Amino acid sequence: MISEQLQRQYAITWRDLNASVIPYSEVVVGHIRSILLMLLSGASLLLLIACVNVGSLVLVRSESRRREIAVRGALGATTARLVRQFVTEGLLLAGLGSGAGIIVAAALMRLLAHLVPKGMASGMPFLNGVGLNAHTVAFAGATALLAALLLATTPVLRFSFQRVRDGLTDGDRGAASGLWRRLGANLVVVELAIAVVLLTGAGLFGRSLYRLLHVPLGFDANHLATVEVAAPDSVYKGKEQTAELYREIAQRIASLPGVESAGLTSRLPVGCNCPTDGIRIVGRPYHGEHNEVNERHVSASYLSTLKATLMRGRFFTEADDASHPGVAIINQALARKFFPGVDPIGQNIADDEGGLPSVWQIVGVIDDIREGPLDVDIAPTEYFPINQTDEPSFTLAARSSQDANALLPVLVRMLRQINPDLGVSNEVSLSEKIGTTQAAMLHRFSAWLVGGFATTALILGVVGVYGVIAYSVSQRTREIGVRMALGAQRSSVYRLVLRQAGWLTLAGLAIGLFCSLGTSILMRSLLFSVYAWDPVTLLCVAALLGLASIAASFLPARRAASTDPVEALRAE
């Protein structure tokens, strides 16, 4: 409604502008909501694997207690009494597990909070209040209670359909063995399938992070030391005094040993697409369009310090100060958008503010520098001489011939010598700053967390494979002894055991890859320059799962191949 009134009142300047109202929660977590949902899904899959593991063990153990339960029933124990017993046992397991999980989660959350750079935390409001509270503890308790009920009701439902007479006549060991033969292999396939889904997600996030950190920047970020500087307004008044400070800092820093060059900028690259400016092209019809572009103010030596590529025209010089006409350098994105097929050198641009607009002549075109976030397309950008402004706050960038971090204290000391009243902060190498940007940290944390889920799932799945194969070997001792007594070689016994593990792995891999197709498509918006169905990632996941399964089944296979036929037949 307010936007419509402004458009009616200022029909020209508000023609291309709109306003929208969104909830505050959307501002805080809107851009990471999909990441949070993905992490919640990964945690849910890991919980499912844990429940499958514990549930299978509880079910097999309860099967071995069939005679005990039957005796209790024969002596008058009601179904409600048996339910209370199993619920108590399930609550004990779930309570101990959830308690340990809460302790580990609290430690991990503190660790993750410390890994976030202090300068970035202010730009990530969703990190405020991260930690254990009543809501998270209640959620964990409810999850544990649900798991306990599932663990308790599974054996109860099974025993409710058996007759007391059957329970008294069946052997405990034989019943448990039969159930494990029917259930164990299927549960392992489920675990391996879930592990494949999580491993695929972790692999995609890892490749996405690598692509993000190696995206073309348009400049050389190595050996660049940066320091933010704030000049006191009470000392530096007007453009002339401020420009003199700019020159002194750039010259004295550039003269330091180990410094190849130095420059100043209003904002470093790989930060945000801000501040912005609305421009229009002088000599072209203007109807109130709001052509928004990035705006940067830089010193004469800044772009050369970055090793930016000059495509046409020239860089700024010290002569481009407030006493000379305004000049500007643009990037190729701006040239492509506003000067398609036209040489922009010599063209004039102006701001679209009311009154008498400021005009700058374009004197150079540089290759695109990634001024905004790593995962955002490069925006049109204009660069103005910092000597033609009086900005009190700026950032110093110095290129070192050695390690940039070793140069940082030297830069701070020199700035203190120039003027002790200068505000100096955020001393960091540019490569380190890029690695700790919000986009990089979100991708890195996602890769770490999903990778942790995947590693845990893989371990549980491999342990399951080992358990099934080892149990199968123990149950087939007589068969293996007969085979070897009839002349079977050790290699054939190895193949017999490994073939069983191979079929389990192939089944889990096939189901997992099919499920990964859907989850990868859902993850597509979270990835950077990586296909959701990335063949390299899938091949690596398949190879990792295959090698892990072979390693898990090797010990049971070796034990089977070392069986003494005489001892095996005698034991049976």
Image: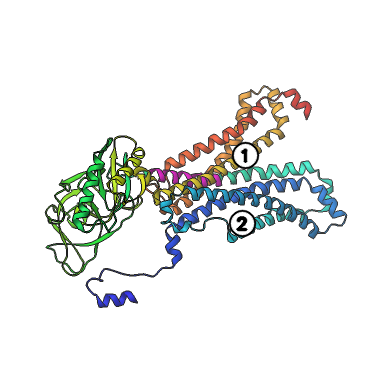
- Where is the C terminus found, in terms of image quarters? top right
Q: Residues within 10 Å of mark 2 (few under 14, many from 20)?
A: some
Does residue 501 appear to the left or right of 374 in the view shown?
right
Return the residue nearer the eye: 352 or 417: 417
Q: Which residues are magenta?
A: 194-211
450 inside magenta stretch? no
Name the residue beneath numbered marker 1: 463
Residue 407 x/y as whole percent: 33, 39
- Callout 2: SS: helix
Q: Are marks 1 and 2 in contact (CB under 8 Å)?
A: no
Q: Which residue is mark 2?
A: 140
Q: Residue at x 71, y 56 (%)?
A: 153
In whole angstroms, how far apart are the C-alphas of marks 1 and 2?
A: 26 Å
Crowdedness near tag 1: few (<14), some (14–19) or many (≥20) residues, C-alpha within 10 Å: some
- Which corner quadrant of the image does residue 80 belong to? bottom right
- Specify how the rendered protein is coloured: rainbow
- 140 to the left or right of 357: right
Q: Is residue 199 magenta?
A: yes
Q: Amino acid at mark 1?
A: Val
**9 shown above or below 227:** below
Q: Position of residue 498 (x, y in %)?
A: 60, 32
